[in-house]
Image (tube, rainbow, N blue to C red):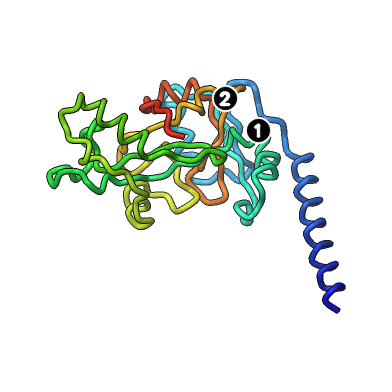
C-alpha cells in the first residue's frame, strides 16, 4: 500500500513537471525590441506602472502574468515561464529598515541616511547586509558612526504600508513612498541585460532592460551578495 502511494506521489510530481515544461514551450520568447509587452488581461496595476516607466524613459519592459502557484515552482520552471535568459536573471525587491538609525531619522527624505531601503537582489544570491552597512558608512564619509547602520528585513506590514505592494508583489517602481533603492552590482553584469522582478501583484512579474532601469530608478549600485 505504501509503495503504491509513493508511486502515485511520484507520478503526480512528474505530471506537474511535464505541465511546467509544456508551459515553458508555449511561452513567448522575451521581446528584444523596445516595444513593451503587456499581458492580455491588462490590469490597473499594469497600466499605472507602464505609464510610470514610459514617463521615466523606460521603453524596453515586459509584464507577464504567472500561475498562482508560481512560488511553489523551482527557479528553473519560473525562468522558463518568464522566458528569462537564466535563473540568475530572476530578482526580488526587499524592504529593509535601519534598526539603529538615530531617533530623528524617521523616513526616507535623506537617501544617504534613510530609515528604509529597498534592495534588489537575485534569487540565486545571498544578500550581504554587512556590505550595505559598510557602503552607507562610506557614503556618509564616516560622519555617522558605523553602529548606526543595521539593516534588517522590515516587518511585512511596514513593507506594505511603505510600498503599497503585498509580499511577493513588491517592486521598486510606483511605490507609495519614495524609498532609496540599492541594486546588487551582480545584476548589472548579467548578459543579456534584461532582468525580472516583482510587478506589483503577486502573480505579475516585470522584466526590464537593466540600462534603462538604472537611468530611471538611479539606484545605489552595491556589491551586496
> How many neighbours does mark 1 have within 10 angstroms: few (below 14), some (14-19), or many (20 or more)?
some
Q: Nearer the viewer, residue 142 or 109?
A: 142
How far from the left and from the top, in percent, is residue 80?
70, 39
Tell me the residue that label 1 is attached to.
86
Q: Nearer the viewer, residue 59 or 5?
A: 5
**Residue 202 located left or right of residue 131:** right
How far from the left and from the top, in percent, is residue 217?
39, 28
Residue at 48%, 48% in the rendered image: 169
The image quadrant that residue 177 belongs to is top left
Hey, which residue is sitting farthest left in the picture?
Answer: 104
- Measured in 3D between alpha carbons, the distance from the residue under mark 2 to the one under mark 1, in whole angstroms, is 9 Å
Q: Nearer the viewer, residue 146 or 210?
A: 146
Residue at 78%, 59% in the rendered image: 13
Q: Nearer the viewer, residue 202 or 102?
A: 102
Residue at 41%, 26% in the rendered image: 55
Where disc 1 sits, the SS reads: loop
Q: What is the quadrant of the N terminus in the image?
A: bottom right
Would you place residue 71 above or below residue 52 in this image? Answer: below
Would you place residue 122 above or below residue 100 in this image? Answer: above
How far from the left and from the top, in percent, is residue 85?
66, 30
How far from the left and from the top, in percent, is residue 207?
56, 33
Would you place residue 169 above or below residue 110 in this image? Answer: below
Q: Earlier in the sequence, mark 2 or mark 1?
A: 1
Q: Are marks 2 and 1 in contact (CB under 8 Å)?
A: yes
**Residue 165 located left or right of residue 83:** left
> How many neighbours does mark 2 have within 10 angstroms: few (below 14), some (14-19), or many (20 or more)?
some
Residue at 70%, 45% in the rendered image: 77
Where disc 2 sits, the SS reads: loop
User: Which dot marks residue 178?
Assistant: none
Tell me the residue that label 2 is attached to.
190
Amino acid at each position: 500500500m505504501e509503495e503504491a502511494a509513493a508511486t502515485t506521489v511520484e507520478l503526480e510530481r512528474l505530471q506537474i513537471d511535464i505541465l511546467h515544461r509544456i508551459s515553458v514551450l508555449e511561452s513567448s520568447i522575451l521581446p528584444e525590441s523596445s516595444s513593451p509587452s503587456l499581458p492580455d488581461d491588462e490590469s490597473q496595476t499594469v497600466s499605472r506602472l507602464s505609464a510610470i516607466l514610459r514617463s521615466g524613459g523606460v521603453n524596453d519592459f515586459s509584464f507577464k502574468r504567472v500561475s498562482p502557484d508560481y512560488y511553489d515552482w523551482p527557479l528553473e520552471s519560473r525562468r522558463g515561464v518568464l522566458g528569462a535568459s537564466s535563473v540568475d536573471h530572476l530578482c526580488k525587491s526587499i524592504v529593509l529598515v535601519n534598526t539603529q538609525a538615530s531617533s530623528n531619522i524617521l523616513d526616507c527624505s535623506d537617501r544617504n541616511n534613510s530609515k528604509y531601503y529597498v534592495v534588489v537582489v537575485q534569487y540565486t544570491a545571498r544578500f550581504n547586509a554587512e556590505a550595505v552597512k559598510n557602503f552607507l558608512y562610506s557614503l556618509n564619509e564616516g560622519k555617522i558612526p558605523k553602529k548606526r547602520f543595521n539593516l534588517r528585513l522590515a516587518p511585512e506590514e511596514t513593507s506594505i504600508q511603505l510600498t503599497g505592494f503585498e509580499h511577493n508583489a513588491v517592486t521598486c517602481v510606483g511605490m507609495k513612498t519614495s524609498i532609496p533603492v540599492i541594486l546588487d552590482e551582480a545584476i548589472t553584469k548579467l548578459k543579456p541585460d534584461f532582468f525580472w522582478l516583482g510587478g506589483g501583484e503577486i502573480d505579475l512579474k516585470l522584466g526590464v532592460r537593466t540600462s534603462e532601469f538604472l537611468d530611471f530608478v538611479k539606484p545605489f549600485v552595491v556589491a551586496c551578495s
